[in-house]
Image: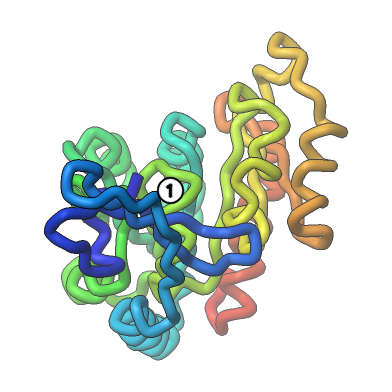
Amino acid sequence: MCKDCGCGKSHVHSHSHTHVREDGTVYTHVHEDPHEHAKPPVTVKLEQAILSANDAAAAANRVWLAAKGIVALNLISSPGSGKTRLLEKTLEYFSGKGTPCAVIVGDQYGEADSLRLRRYTSAVTQIETGERCHLNAEEIMAALPRSVPEGTRILFIENVGNLVCPVAFDLGENAKIALLSTPEGEEKPVKYPALFASASLVVLTKMDLAEVLRWNAEECTASIRKVNPSVEILPVSARTGDGMQKWFAYLNHLIIENGGNQ
């Protein structure tokens, strides 16, 4: 999946795929070219040093953001889960409260999401990742000075739609927010546990579709609790507004906790 993530160097006659285990550790499958070697695929652990450059940049980002009193949230989900719609409603709410927000949007190609969000704030920056399926801390570091105006209280990082690769890359955020939409089903947290295990909050989106989809709230909650027993779970519908006030309250609490004003 992670075709060009820079996690490691590949041999001229091999190719690799990077994955994240349930416990959060990173590993890669290196597949030898069958025309060059008769050996079966081997698994090579990627030590923490592989991500050390990213981690150093993430630490610098965290210091930069903390010095300015900015809460940074890394929103991770599948494509089509409703991240952008949730952010539209969130930016609209905070604009009405006079609370400055900024957004960094990660997509492989195009600016469709950025164009939508710029209707609510001019502080929206697009990062195109090309073949890579996640943002990295170095990209965020390069974007911060031009993307986050003075006085910003919250920086939303809308990561590339992917439940696996973005989890391994710390961006310097205060928290990872996992989004899971009702059309995706109830079992995703146990199929892709690394994200839900590391999330500070799980937002269940498109709750207005739950009834028609016969979505099972108890089953979904049980799936989340299997990998993260204590995480807060917040059902919302950005379309109807159900649950949105609790989402806004969660964000306001983070602002206050970080030394800002509500």
Q: How many marks?
A: 1
Is 109 left, or right, of 168 in this rendering? left
Q: Name the residue under label 1.
A: 91
- Give the residue drawn at x 47%, y 38%: 78
Please provide percent x and percent y for residue 127: 20, 54
Residue 68 in sight: no
Q: Identify the image quadrant of the C terminus.
A: bottom right
Please provide percent x and percent y for residue 255: 56, 72
- Give the residue drawn at x 67%, y 59%: 197
- Give the residue drawn at x 31%, y 42%: 117
Please provide percent x and percent y for residue 209: 66, 17
Q: Quadrant of residue 139?
A: bottom left
Nearer to us in this view, 194 or 71: 194
Q: Identify the image quadrant of the N terminus.
A: top left
Q: Quadrant of residue 242?
A: top right
Q: Residue furthest front?
A: 38
- 46 lies above or below 82: below
- Give the residue drawn at x 62%, y 63%: 198
Nearer to us in this view, 51 or 207: 51
Colour mapping used in the image: rainbow
Q: Which amino acid does label 1 sit on?
A: Leu
